[in-house]
Amino acid sequence: MHKKYLPITLVLAVLLALLAVMGYRTNTRTAPTIGLAAEKQIYLTFDDGPSTVVTGKVLDVLKEEGVKATFFIVSDRVAGREDVLRRAAKEGHTLGVHSANHVYEQIYASEEAFLSDVERCAKVIKRVTGVTPDVYRFPGGGGAKRNTYAKLLQEKGYRVVAWNAVCGDEEIPNASAETLLCESVKTARGKQPVVLLLHDSAPHKETAAALPAIIAHFKSQGYTFCKF
Ligand SMILES: [Zn+2]
C-alpha cells in the first residue's frame, strides 16, 4: 500500500470498527424487545392480602419457582404482618394499592373518599417497605364511576391494572386446587398477555395449594412470567 493512503485507510478502518461495535450494541439492545412482542406473557396478580397463612405460602412457591408477581394490598390487613409485606418487596415482587379497608360503600362514597382510601393504603406500603406504589387495582372492579376514578388515579401517577383471567377462588365456592387450575387455564385461553386474578387473603389456602400447578402449566406452555 502506498504511504500516502495509509492515514485515510486507518481512519476508515477505525470508522468501520466503530460502526460494527455500534451495530452490535444496537442489535443486543433491540433483540430482546423484538422477542418480547411475540412472547406469551402471564402476570400473576394477588389481591386482598397480606394474610398470615396464605401470603407466606404464596411467597414460598414463587421463590421456589423463580417467578415474580404483583400484590394488590389491603393496608388495614398489614398491621402485625409487616414482615410478610417486607418479604414480598425484598423478593422482588411488585406491591400495588388495592384499598385501605376494602369496604366498597366507603371507598366509592365520593371522589374525596376514594382518593383518601388510595392515599391511606399507599402510605402504609411506603412506611413499611419503603416502596412508593404506582399500580392500582379497583376493589370490586370500580363500579359505575370507574372512569372518573381512573382519571384521578392517572393524575396521581398510578397505572390501573385490571384482569382478563381468573383462577376462580372468589367466583367458585369452595373450589379445589384442581378446579382453580382448570379455571385459570380456561379463562386465560386466547388472552395475550394473560393477567390472572388470584387472592392471597386468609380464606384462600387452596389458591396457594393450586399455585405450583398453575405455574407449571403456564411454564410448560412457554409463558414468561411478568410483574407490573
Ligand atoms: Zn379485592
Image (spheres, grey):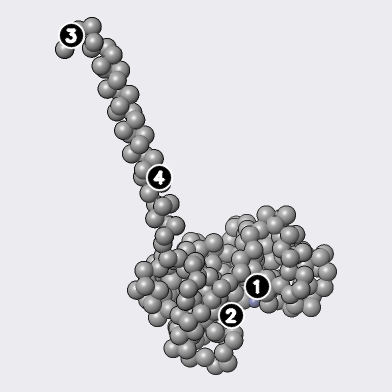
The image's mark for residue 29 is: 4
Q: Quadrant of the N terminus?
A: top left
Label 1 within 8 A of ligand 1 by Cβ: yes
What residue is shown with label 2?
201
Query: What's the CA distance linking mark 1 and mark 4?
Result: 38 Å
Label 2 within 8 A of ligand 1 by Cβ: yes
The image's mark for residue 2 is: 3
Q: Nearer the viewer, mark 1 or mark 3?
A: 3
Q: Is mark 3 on a helix, strand or loop?
A: loop
Residue farthest to the bottom, as pictured:
174
Kind of residue sitting beneath label 1: Val
Label 2 environment density (alpha carbons within 10 Å; few <14, some 14–19, many ≥20) = many
Q: Which of 118 and 16 is in front in this view?
A: 16
Percent x, y for residue 6? 23, 12
Number of numbered discs visible in the structure rendering:
4
Query: What's the CA distance linking mark 1 and mark 2?
Result: 9 Å
Residue drawn at x 58%, y 64% is 95
Q: Is mark 1 on a helix, strand or loop?
A: strand
Q: Do the residues labelled 1 and 2 touch (CB within 8 Å)?
A: yes
Residue 173 quadrant: bottom right
Residue drawn at x 54%, y 76% is 165
Q: Quadrant of the C terminus?
A: bottom right
Query: What's the CA distance linking mark 1 and mark 3?
Result: 78 Å
